[in-house]
Amino acid sequence: MTVFTAEVVVTLRPVINDPQGLSVRAGLRLLGFDGVVSARVGKFIELVVEAEDEAAARAMVTRMCERLLCNPVIEDWRIDSLRALEAAT
Amino acid sequence: MTVFTAEVVVTLRPVINDPQGLSVRAGLRLLGFDGVVSARVGKFIELVVEAEDEAAARAMVTRMCERLLCNPVIEDWRIDSLRALEAAT
């Protein structure tokens, strides 16, 4: 078994209203950042998983996203990076 | 002025306790994902900003992180990607 780290990004779908992002944009403008056009806030999930190989790790993380990490009605997800941790095996 | 999209990742520092991450790990294990070792949850912020050039956009996003998006006591941040939007200028 090898230990992998995976970085998963979960974002609201473009058509979904994002009050948290609107608050961030309003806050930035109040601070004088007039150049900000929009802000949207999603989740960034760092996972450490044990798997046989990279394909198995990717398949496991994909199932995790589909079953728990992402609400497919309002969210999209992607695996940003997946790499073996050399130190731990 | 050019329009840029920036992706900012804000994560809890490694020594900071992450109850949301612990809940995610517990939930994944309950679902049968025995291979999950740890999970940590951060924020993913998509920004659209107007700036003269890429250096100015990067400087602006850096100041946004330092002034509003990140709490430096408990969080780290990084700019994951910064690119010009061809369509809008």
Image (cartoon, coloured by chain):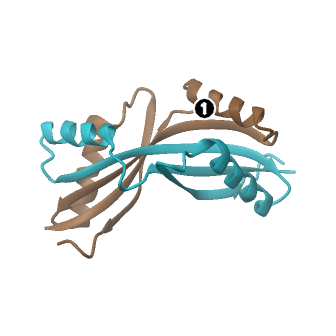
Chain colours: A cyan, B brown
What residue sits 36% from the left and 36% below the top?
B70
Residue B73 occupies quadrant: top left
Q: Secondary structure at mark 1?
A: helix
Residue on which disc 1 sits: B21
Residue B19 falls left or right of residue B12: right
Please report the residue visible at 37 percent of the width from the left and 30 percent of the height from the top: B71
Which residue is found at the position 68% from the left and 57% from the top?
A83
Query: Does residue A55 appear in the picture of this structure?
Result: yes
Left or right of B42, for residue B37: right
- In this view, the residue farthest toward the front is A73
Q: Position of residue B6 (x, y in %)?
A: 34, 57
Left/right of residue B41 with respect to residue A3 in the rendered view: left
Chain letter of disc 1 in the image:
B
Residue drawn at x 63%, y 49% is A65
Q: Amino acid at mark 1?
A: Gly
Q: Foreground: B30 or B59?
A: B30
Viewer-side residue, B73 vs A9: A9
